[in-house]
Image: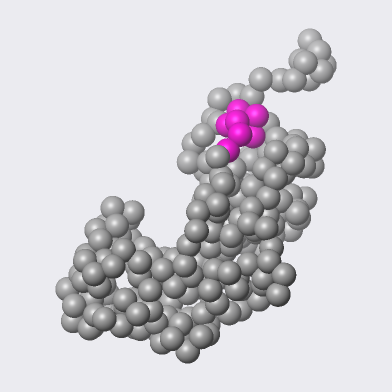
Amino acid sequence: MAQRRRGFDVELAQAHLAKRDRKLAAWMRRIGPLDVEGWRKPFETVDALARSILYQQLSGKAAATIVGRVEVAVASKRLTAEALTRVDDPTLRACGVSGNKTLALRDLARRAAQGDVPSARQLGGMDDAAIIEALTAVRGIGRWTVEMLLMFRLGRPDILPIDDLGVRKGAQRVDKLDEMLAPKALAERGEVWGPYRTLAGFYLWRIADGEGGAKPKPKPEEKRSQD
């Protein structure tokens, strides 16, 4: 199984997006280049998924507190399948882990022990669709969670999480729409960004968070046309 290179050429992706979408390009100029190469850091699939489960539907601070308690309970900074099996349900609940999340962690550990959860190395040899199919089989892991792993951990270049509220809000702001696009419409809108929809998504999150809000400076040729 051939390994795919993690990440992509960000400068090439920026040039591509700027050429294909003038409206997005204006925001990109105002925000500037992004440091999005966290995919260079090593990771373990089970650990990454376990943390995703624990962070679901919680603020970052609250989730980090619970994760810290779980790390203490399992006596490990890595939430591996072996570590998760060392702690019983009442202990997890005492850490602040909900009943549904406890069941999800148990299913994750069981599937990993059976060899049904691909390692980070194995993921490197799989295409995006196969990864989504394999990991969404785990209880509590939906498509959005896997898309985050594809973008932030594996650096896959062409992922657009169309159900993500921030991405939808960013696209709404770029296009100056009264309402957010529905996911299907956003998927169609995002076709112009391929094969670098991941970088477009990174920018849309920044735009939704209020970055680049100042009026863009016109290019020299644009300024001349306005005089």
Q: For this rendering, which residue is in front, 21 or 139?
A: 139
- Image quarter in which the C terminus is found: top right
Q: Is residue 186 magenta?
A: no
> What x and y, as percent, mark residue 215?
60, 24
Looking at the image, residue 223 lies above or below residue 196: above
Q: For this rendering, which residue is in front, 125 or 54?
A: 125
> What x and y, as percent, mark residue 51?
38, 65
- Tally the numbered discs: 0
> What x and y, as percent, mark residue 59?
32, 55
User: Most extreme residue toward the top, as rendered?
Assistant: 227
Residue 96 shows in this picture? no
| 32 displayed left or right of 72 | right
- Image quarter in which the N terminus is found: bottom right
Residue 21 image-quadrant placement: top right
**Residue at the spot x=68%, y=66% of the render?**
3
**Residue at the spot x=33%, y=54% of the render?**
60
**Residue at the spot x=48%, y=62% of the render?**
43
Q: Which residues are magenta?
A: 28-34
Residue 35 shows in this picture? yes
